[in-house]
Image: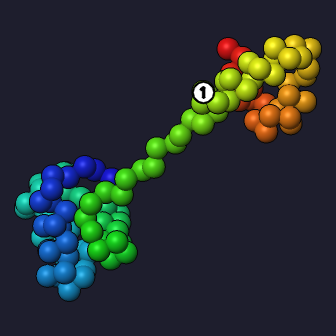
Amino acid sequence: MVKYTNEQPLQILKIYYRNSESVTATLRTLTPIFGRNSRPSRQAVTSLVKKFESTYSLCDVAVPVRLWVGRSVENIAAVETSVANDPNQSIPRRSQELGIAKTTLWRNFA
């Protein structure tokens, strides 16, 4: 979906509800405002309306940030201690003992 200024989604919704919830009539009304080639698409209008009707907000939903817990200080220290105690132990066995995924162990070795 195209990024709009703060006022444009509100303007699109007002026009949509003013035109009896008709997407076609909304697009006709938006053409002189946005221009023929830069007006929102039918899909953009319907997704904006669905988002507004489900969240009652025009704000974007924040995407959660993935936490990288594998490279935590505790995990690195546990791997270092485990390697110091038994350097010949296999990665799968060490993974089971520490409760850390095998790929995370490889990352912590580097």
Q: Closest to the observer: 43 or 104?
A: 104
Residue at the spot x=52%, y=42% of the render?
66
Q: Is residue 17 left or right of residue 98?
A: left
Determine whether 25 is above or below 45 in the image. Answer: below
Residue at the spot x=32%, y=77% of the render?
53
Residue at the spot x=24%, y=74% of the render?
24
Residue position marked by numbered label 1 in the rendering:
73
Q: Residues within 10 Å of mark 1 (few under 14, many from 20)?
A: few
Q: Is residue 99 left or right of residue 25?
A: right
Quarter assignment of residue 105: top right
Amino acid bearing label 1: Val
Q: Closest to the observer: 84 or 37?
A: 84
Quarter assignment of residue 110: top right
Image x and y of residue 27, in percent: 20, 68
Image x and y of residue 104, in percent: 71, 29
Image x and y of residue 9, in percent: 19, 63
Q: Does the rendering let one see residue 45?
A: no
Q: Closest to the observer: 2 or 66?
A: 66
Q: Residue furthest left?
A: 32
Image x and y of residue 44, in percent: 31, 61
Q: Is residue 59 left or right of residue 36?
A: right
Q: Closest to the observer: 33 or 57?
A: 57
Q: Does the rendering let one see residue 53?
A: yes
Residue at the spot x=19%, y=81% of the render?
17
Label 1 secondary element:
helix
